[in-house]
Image (tube, rainbow, N blue to C red):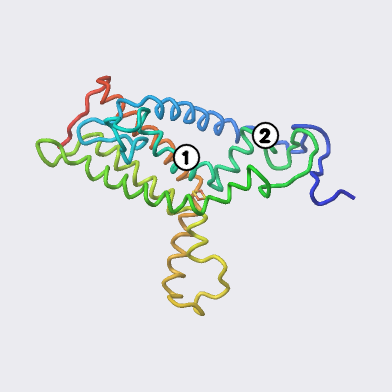
């Protein structure tokens, strides 16, 4: 009988009794996450075309030392760790990239490469994934800055107005907020480790909060992808306008 720490596997890598196209699930993850990773890395190091008029790219927010008084590299590198850490340790993304990039396993009931001891996320470096609950608090701080940027995007030099960029940045922060509020860690904060809501202080309020967060949590995967696309699109829009490739359209 196999020890509980060993992977029990019949056949080699990719062997399965599944008849469906199990690989179809990992292809979009590779394409989307791979494209975003390459683009975000390029933009983080580029260090220019991150602001135009009242618009600021979400990759560079909050903007620290743009005049390069004490930091000679791209300002994005000073703030990258917060949002990157939050997404990289997200429960949903972990499942997605373990399957799509590590092929470990590539899908449910599909053979992985080799037979080895299974330690899950109990040893280095994967034990660091437990930092997610702390990255959640960091993400809340970033959300506050991005809401400030979205509101600021309506304040043009000649007064209050609405540009396409204002709408792009606002849509982005709404999606990022939905992604953050649907986080598993927040749902656990509201109602985890509880057998009885009415036995605790603020029980009814906590129960209502937990139910609302649970509803959002059910769509976490959707918000994860939508907000990933929106943050990349918002940065791309600001970059194009800032570099002169595109003219921002003023709607109001
Ligand atoms: Fe995905 Fe927390 S679980 S953001």
Instruction: Give x and y (percent) for residue 242.
Output: 26, 25
In this view of the protein, which residue sits in the foreground, 33 or 189? 189
Q: Residues within 10 Å of mark 1 (few under 14, many from 20)?
A: few
Quarter of the image with the C terminus is top left
Instruction: Give x and y (percent) for residue 12.
Output: 80, 32
Residue drawn 22% across the image and 24% down it: 247
Q: Which secondary structure lies at badge 1?
A: helix
Q: CA distance from mark 2 to mark 1?
A: 22 Å
Q: How many marks?
A: 2
- Name the residue furthest top: 245
Q: Is residue 45 left or right of residue 250?
A: right
- Name the residue furthest right: 1
Q: Is residue 170 left or right of residue 82?
A: left
Above or below, 7 relative to 244: below
Q: Which secondary structure lies at badge 2?
A: loop
Report the mark closest to the observer, 2 or 1.
Answer: 1
Residue at image mark 1:
84
Residue drawn 38% across the image and 24% down it: 46
Which of the 4 image quarters holds residue 40? top left
Residue at image mark 2:
103
Q: Residues within 10 Å of mark 2 (few under 14, many from 20)?
A: some
Q: Is residue 8 left or right of residue 173?
A: right
């Amino acid at each position: 009988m196999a020890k509980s720490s060993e992977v029990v596997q019949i056949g080699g890598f990719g062997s399965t009794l599944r008849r469906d196209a199990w690989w179809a699930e990992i292809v979009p993850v590779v394409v989307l996450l791979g494209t975003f990773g390459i683009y975000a890395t390029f933009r983080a190091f580029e260090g220019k075309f991150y602001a135009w008029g009242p618009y600021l790219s979400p990759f560079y927010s909050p903007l620290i030392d743009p005049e390069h008084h004490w930091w000679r590299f791209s300002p994005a590198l000073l703030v990258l760790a917060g949002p990157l850490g939050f997404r990289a340790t997200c429960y949903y993304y972990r499942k997605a990239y373990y399957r799509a990039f590590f092929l470990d396993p590539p899908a449910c009931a599909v053979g992985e490469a080799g037979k080895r001891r299974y330690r899950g996320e109990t040893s280095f470096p994967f034990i660091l994934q437990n930092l997610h609950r702390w990255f959640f608090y960091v993400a809340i701080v970033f959300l506050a800055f991005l809401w400030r940027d979205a509101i600021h995007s309506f304040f043009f030099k000649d007064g209050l107005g609405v540009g396409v960029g204002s709408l792009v940045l606002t849509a982005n922060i709404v999606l990022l907020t939905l992604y953050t509020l649907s986080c598993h860690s927040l749902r656990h904060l509201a109602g985890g480790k509880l057998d009885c809501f009415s036995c605790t202080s603020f029980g009814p309020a906590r129960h209502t909060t937990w139910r609302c967060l649970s509803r959002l949590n059910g769509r976490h995967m959707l918000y994860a992808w939508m907000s990933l696309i929106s943050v990349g699109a918002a940065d791309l829009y600001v970059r194009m306008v800032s570099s002169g490739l595109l003219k921002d359209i003023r709607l109001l």
